[in-house]
Image: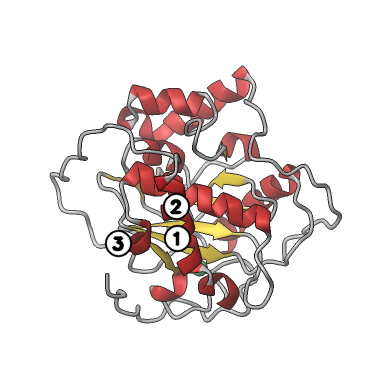
Amino acid sequence: MFGFAGGCSDDHGLGDGLPSRRAVLGAASVLGLGVFDLVDNVAMAEIESGSPGPAGPRVHTRREWGARKPRKATKILKRVPDRIIVHHTATPNTRDYSLAHAYRLSRDIQRFHMRSRKWNDTGQQLTISRGGHVMEGRDGSLAAILSGRHVLGAQALHHNDHTIGIENEGNYMRAPVPGSLWTSLVTVCAWLCAEYRLDPNRAIVGHRDYGKTSCPGDVLYARLPELRRAVAMYLSDGGPKPKPRPEPPVPDVPEPEIMEEPMITPSSDLDVPDDLPPMRRPPS
Ligand SMILES: [Zn+2]
């Protein structure tokens, strides 16, 4: 386990204010490690503002939550994902909705994935805490999203090349989803659908649609139709809109067979390990 601190310090809010210039420059430099050349000026300006845009979610960067460096440089695919995979972390349903807790969660997940799973970095691209705080996961994810690229994660065995993963803090086999988390999940999915030009009704899936796992829990999984409707409504009602952007170029070399690791969430005792033969894709 990860030593989750108890206590309830509710400083929830998506608008946590802009980071300091020092933090901004630091984040930009961290993000620039592997992806700088892929990020256009618009995207870079958004990263430097600490936000994907006025209508998008406030995404806390790896610099902010104190990420360690990945073991190997992030692999960035010149394509957009076609599915958004909703996960739960299967960690305790904490009542600590603070930003400090959210940062600690991100560090715990990264440590777990790197030390115990021996992965290169955090497996998923984005993390949402029960307090609704949104954090960048795998290195370069934010820049990639903003530039129409896709960071290869480790969150859905055999499907990492075409899916982007959101880890939602908590265990939703039986427990209800906190409103703060739900609101952020809707916003993040709408943002991703806008940036990647995805139809929420087709794009949003649960981890169990792609592997033998109980993730994201019966409760959260049952709410995916509601999530798709909410995102569609958000997009049609003044939510984030896709920016004009040329279609990403076709890769000039075939992508190698993906050898990424299975996603096993911290303390996923309710989950069947998903290093089993993949289920076929759900009909689209
Ligand atoms: Zn999962």
Residue projecting furthest to the right: 7
Name the foreground residue: 192 vs 275.
192
In the displayed structure, 52 sits above or below 8; it is above
The image position of residue 80, as x and y in percent, is 29, 48
Where disc 1 sits, the SS reads helix
Amino acid bearing label 1: Arg
Where disc 2 sits, the SS reads helix
Label number found at residue 258: 3
Label number found at residue 229: 1
Mark 3 vs 2, N-terminal side: 2
Mark 1 vs 3, N-terminal side: 1
Image depth: mark 1 or mark 3 in front: 1
Quadrant in the rendering for residue 43: top left
| Image quadrant where one finds the N terminus | bottom right
Q: Residues within 10 Å of mark 1 (few under 14, many from 20)?
A: some
Residue at label 2? 233
Quadrant in the rendering for residue 37: top left
The image position of residue 117, as x and y in percent, is 53, 64
Query: CA separation, marks 1 and 3?
Result: 32 Å
| Image quadrant where one finds the C terminus | bottom left
Q: Residues within 10 Å of mark 2 (few under 14, many from 20)?
A: some
